[in-house]
């Protein structure tokens, strides 16, 4: 039985409103799915099925109860589409599901209630041809010109090869928001940027130096990840997941493997969980070090950039020595990990931590007392807590605006269920907050790594794989370095993947950039962008 | 401010201080690169990096070339903000179809003589993504490629070696 939590109250409320809901307790019912969602007997994920006509109405009840909108995705099954939306509150995840007829694929939009659902629904619209009625902005999002307006890549009758033209034309006629008036002008930026970064387009409307509006146009690095995942084996899917976003290779690989492990009903050995934890925390530290340097570099404070890139390089060299890969790709596999951590490696990792702490204790006071850095970072790129919450922002972006959520603490999974740490939090919502929250997260990560090493006991690295039943599904949720990653997997016959949807935290964080840059000056855009550091590849899939 | 200067002095020049074999190799390699560049390009080549669909893994390692350990700029190899200033295009990723025209235009904007270096397994052969409705696969499917630096992603040392190979051509 589910414990008494908010799901019970919401269910009562919805039943009195005459919603037809098949609650989680029947999730083993063959009518819903042959497999099971969620996991080794906990009540952390519940699955509710509702009628499509109540889809939008449900979200109104959900927002009244302060549920956070987590992710949305669809799936094509013969004559119908299965549409999912995931919500979270107090660490309990609710997966809402409905079916709609493929002949008339229409669903009332939840984006009217949850701004966070906006781009996700546009993605589903482009990939499946599902029309979200009442959507506040139904312009195309993921689709540029690589496929026709009337074909939908994630439908089953669309072949992965598609029918592309020899040269895909540029997406010239995207209807950007316009502004008119004396002194208002547009600045188009990208997709090819000036630095060594990923491609995307930013359209500024400015008056003088002040940003009046910023509109993002992403989708340039759409590589068809969801489509080419279909038919893969678990090992092959893990490799692909590790390349959704190169900086989050551990995070995405872990989320995908967790989802697959849930579907297969296997539990990973404790030693494997601890090693995954070490990998994830090391990835977090490496990225935060890089970001902190880059934020300072974007306000021309080169001292910090040089120091942090130096520390990052040393950190990556230990990755190579201990784990055999500088970015830790392909270390996590379905069922466990493929790399062990020897006694010597543990010593090296511990020495590394001591060294890093010492270095940071020199560098951080030097930075903290620097007035030019204060001038540029404090109050710049302000993201109010309400806005951060409305867009469901995650990770350090949310936590710098006071959103006190971390999967590792609020919906813990091994090895975090046996660890104690303090979730870093800042409440000023500016670039300085996003800088300092990263520093606090580094400190917490170092402590976690020490705890994991102390807990390491001899044991297996990998559990034997069980071929999942047809239709088995899993929802893998982990705290990547950017924030919560939610990955959905459904299996087909013969150990093959039927559906894969990874929701990178960037998908929810990118819209916040449009808001936090408002009323900042155009030259501060790079540092605003870096303080958020969304993944283009993770967003575009 | 004093703390800052103290840290700078304490840190010293890490680029030269390293005596580990790997870094000696790096030093030799860099000096070799510099000799070749001196001969052919009067001491410098300008690189425009283009992410044509990468997962960002290659970008992280290209970035590392500029950290104090590798400091590739001391050998006259530097990154520029515009293809119009570039001798070399360093292209990563399978070329996504949405980036195809942008890559072609960047190529056209680069003055001759120019070299194209495809960086990473995806750029070399399509990698994990291959050719699909959304991806053109290898960079050579879109623009002529002069050389390939494989790896997923290639390490900074592999990138340096690759650039040397290019200059040797």
Image (cartoon, grey):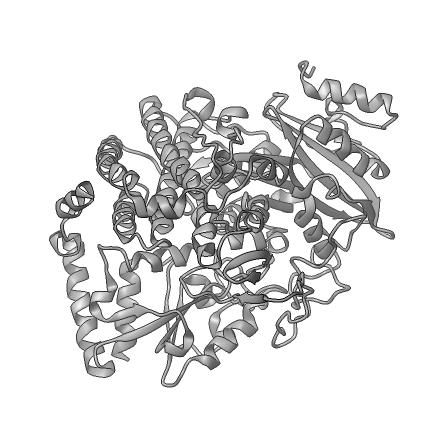
Compared with residue B84, is residue A99 higher up or lower down, i.e. above or below?
above
Determine whether, in the image, residue A449 is placed left or right of residue A201: left
Could you tell me which residue is drawn at 61 percent across and 27 percent down?
A39
Front in this rendered view, residue A272 or A295: A295
Single out the residue that lies furthest toward the bottom.
B112
Front in this rendered view, residue B140 or A313: A313
Q: Quadrant of the N terminus of chain A?
A: top right
- Residue A465 visible, this orientation: no
Determine whether, in the image, residue A313 is placed left or right of residue A140: left
Determine whether, in the image, residue A449 is placed left or right of residue A82: left
Compared with residue A404, is residue A161 higher up or lower down, i.e. above or below?
below
Q: Quadrant of residue A4?
A: top right
Residue A87 locus on image (x, y percent): 66, 33
Compared with residue A508, is residue B88 higher up or lower down, i.e. above or below?
below
Single out the residue that lies furthest toward the front.
A182
Residue A142 locus on image (x, y percent): 65, 58
Could you tell me which residue is drawn at 58 percent across and 48 percent down?
A515
Residue A368 locus on image (x, y percent): 30, 38
Compared with residue B44, is residue A76 higher up or lower down, i.e. above or below?
above
Could you tell me which residue is drawn at 26 percent across and 45 percent down?
A311
Determine whether, in the image, residue A173 is placed left or right of residue A316: right
Count of picture labels: 0
Q: Quadrant of the C terminus of chain A?
A: bottom right
Q: Quadrant of residue A68?
A: top right
């Amino acid at each position: 039985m589910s414990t008494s939590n908010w799901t019970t109250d919401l269910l009562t409320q919805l039943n009195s409103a005459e919603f037809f809901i098949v609650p989680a307790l029947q999730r083993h019912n063959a009518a819903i799915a042959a497999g099971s969602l969620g996991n080794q007997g906990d009540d952390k994920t519940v699955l509710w099925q509702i009628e499509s006509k109540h889809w939008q109405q449900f979200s109104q009840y959900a927002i009244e109860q302060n549920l956070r909108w987590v992710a949305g995705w669809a799936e094509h099954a013969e004559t119908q589409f299965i549409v999912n939306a995931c919500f979270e509150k107090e660490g309990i995840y609710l997966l809402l599901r409905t079916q709609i007829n493929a002949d008339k694929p229409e669903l009332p939009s939840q984006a009217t209630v949850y701004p966070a659902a906006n781009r996700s629904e546009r993605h589903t619209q482009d990939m499946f041809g599902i029309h979200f009625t009442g959507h506040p902005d139904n312009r195309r999002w993921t689709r540029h010109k690589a496929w026709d307006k009337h074909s939908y890549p994630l439908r089953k009758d669309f072949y992965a090869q598609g029918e592309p033209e020899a040269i895909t034309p540029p997406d010239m006629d995207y209807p950007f928001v316009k502004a008119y008036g004396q002194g208002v002008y547009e600045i188009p930026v990208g997709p090819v940027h000036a630095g060594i970064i990923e491609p995307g387009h930013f359209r500024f409307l400015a008056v003088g130096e002040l940003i009046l509006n910023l509109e993002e146009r992403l989708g340039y690095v759409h590589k068809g990840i969801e489509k080419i995942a279909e038919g893969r084996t678990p090992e092959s899917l893990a490799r692909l997941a590790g390349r959704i976003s190169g900086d989050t290779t551990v995070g995405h690989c872990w989320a995908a493997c967790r989802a697959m492990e849930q579907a297969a009903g296997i539990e990973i050995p404790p030693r494997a969980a601890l090693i995954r934890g070490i990998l994830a925390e090391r990835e977090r530290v490496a990225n935060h070090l890089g970001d902190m340097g880059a934020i300072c570099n974007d306000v021309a404070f080169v001292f910090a950039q040089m120091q942090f890139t130096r520390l990052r390089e040393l950190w990556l060299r230990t990755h190579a020595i201990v784990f055999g890969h500088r970015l830790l790709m392909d270390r996590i596999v379905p069922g466990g990990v493929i790399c062990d951590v020897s006694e010597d490696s543990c010593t090296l990792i511990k020495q590394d931590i001591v060294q890093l702490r010492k270095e940071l204790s020199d560098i951080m006071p030097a930075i903290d007392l620097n007035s030019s850095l204060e001038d540029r970072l404090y109050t710049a790129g302000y993201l109010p807590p309400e806005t951060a919450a409305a867009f469901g922002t995650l990770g350090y972006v949310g936590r710098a605006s006071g959103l006190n959520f971390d999967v590792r603490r609020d919906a813990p999974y091994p090895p975090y269920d046996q660890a104690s740490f303090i979730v870093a939090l800042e409440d000023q919502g500016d670039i300085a907050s996003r800088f300092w929250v990263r520093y606090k997260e580094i400190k917490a990560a170092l402590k976690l790594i020490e705890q994991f090493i102390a807990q390491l006991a001899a044991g297996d690295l990998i559990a034997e794989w069980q071929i999942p039943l047809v239709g088995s599904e899993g929802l893998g949720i982990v705290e990547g370095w950017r924030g919560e990653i939610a990955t959905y997997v459904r299996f087909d016959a013969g150990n093959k993947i039927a559906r894969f949807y990874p929701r990178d935290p960037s998908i929810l964080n990118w819209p916040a950039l449009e808001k936090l840059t408002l009323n900042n000056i155009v030259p501060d855009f790079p540092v605003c962008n870096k303080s958020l550091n969304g993944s283009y590849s993770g967003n575009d899939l | 401010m004093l703390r800052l200067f103290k840290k700078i002095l304490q840190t010293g020049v890490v680029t030269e201080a390293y005596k580990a074999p790997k870094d000696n190799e790096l030093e030799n390699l860099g000096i070799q690169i510099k000799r070749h560049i001196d001969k052919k390009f009067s001491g410098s080549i300008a690189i425009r990096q283009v992410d044509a669909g990468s997962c960002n893994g290659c970008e992280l390692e290209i970035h590392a070339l500029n950290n104090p350990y590798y400091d590739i700029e001391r050998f006259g190899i530097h990154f520029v903000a515009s293809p119009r200033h570039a001798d070399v295009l360093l292209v990563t990723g399978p070329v996504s179809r949405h980036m195809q025209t942008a890559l072609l235009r960047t190529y056209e904007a680069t003055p001759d003589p120019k070299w194209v270096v495809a960086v990473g397994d995806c750029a070399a052969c399509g990698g994990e993504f291959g050719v699909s409705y959304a991806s053109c696969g290898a960079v050579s499917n879109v623009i002529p490629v002069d050389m390939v630096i494989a790896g997923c992603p290639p390490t900074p040392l592999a990138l340096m070696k690759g650039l040397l190979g290019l200059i040797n051509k």
